[in-house]
Image (cartoon, rainbow, N blue to C red):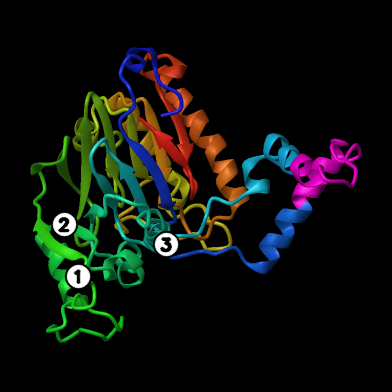
Amino acid sequence: MHEQSSDSQSIPNVFTITYWGVTGTLTTPLRAMEVTDKLIGALHYLIERDRLADLRSGPDLEANLRRRIEEELPFHLRSSYGGNTTCVEVQTPDALLILDCGSGFRELGVALAVRWQAPNAERTAHVLVTHAHIDHIYATPYFLPYYDPENHFTIYGSPQTLHNLSVLFDPQSEMSRRYFPPTFEQMKALKEFRPILPGSAFPIGSTQIRTHPLMHPGGCLAYRLENAGRVFVFATDHEQVEMPDHGLAEFARGADLFYTEGQYTRGEYEGRDPIGNSPALPRQGWGHSTIEACVATAVAAGVRELHLGHRDPARSDEDIARLEVSLRQLLREELRRAGRAEDSCRARIVHEGLVVRC
């Protein structure tokens, strides 16, 4: 990670983590009016602070504008948290791991197709699928590297998840081509499918991986990656019915980076508060957690950094920015209750394109 607590500074970073998709449930591209509103908001912010008056036309104007925007505008005005669903790339010292195949998986595929054109590129990757809900697998047939027989992919998932993928993509399946034209027959780079069970452990290169069952309709797996003293835990799509969630806290114990999902606030989860323009509805049993529960579990686990993803698609970038302020305040309060220093754990809501190291 970019910032580390003092007890981890002597251990070098081993994981490079890139978020290609962090939205939950549905893809949410910015609408035309949202782009306009963002431009107006950015200009208003800079003009109010008299930060444009000194700029002049000339060969350096674009560079000066870019610097002013990047250095002075809050993130939600100068960029976007993104609208692609879950896909996370993890580069380890000796292997490329991919977590989930939401719509961000397509974006990663475009990047890999270019990256792997380099001479002597290692064209091998391991895809770890958490579960087969559509927002976590629906970029599977749109992933360009799957169609190049020179590439080598192994897919890991629970037996049920692998079965569900076969139902959709096995050319012999009754459901073949019902939802997607391609089948596994065209995806020549898929060399192996490996079933894994909750609680299992296995290596990929020098990285040791453990799994943990999550509470989500149809089942879901969390993954704990350990290498050279560093730990990254990926636990998306989980409903924490206790605060903290003791099972998940034990699984994430001492992690350098703990990614999980807090799709709702407590008020939204219990049906007291709306989300964006969506009506207030009770959401118990939907398989997703509250931010309050995620914070409590992260502090109980003693993790060094908490990343929240799988954001609700009804939220705007401005909504997420406000929610991130609340997240950090909740974390400060929980750390104080636990008798821990405020800088012993950090938290953020991740955005598409974010790259961190741990």
Classify residue 50 by image quadrant: top right
Are the residues flagged by discs 2 and 3 in contact, CB closer than 8 Å? Answer: no
Q: Residue at x 22, y 25 (%)?
A: 228
Residue pointed to by mark 2: 157
Are the residues flagged by discs 1 and 3 in contact, CB closer than 8 Å? Answer: no
The quadrant in which the C terminus is found is top left
Residue 49 shown in magenta: yes
How far apart, in angstroms, are the residues tagged by discs 1 and 3? 22 Å
Residue 348 drawn at (x, y percent): 48, 36
Q: Specify the label residue 110 is tagged with.
A: 3
23 or 184, nearer to the observer:
184
Residue type indicated by callout 1: Leu
Residue pointed to by mark 1: 165
Residue 26 drawn at (x, y percent): 43, 65
Q: Residue at x 50, y 59 (%)?
A: 83
Return the disc, 2 or 3, that comes first in the chain's sequence. 3
358 or 311, nearer to the observer:
358
In the current view of this chain or complex, which residue is farthest to the front?
A: 119
Q: Is residue 329 left or right of residue 187?
A: right
Looking at the image, is mark 1 or mark 3 nearer the viewer? Answer: 3
The span picked out in magenta is 41-65
Classify residue 13 by image quadrant: top left
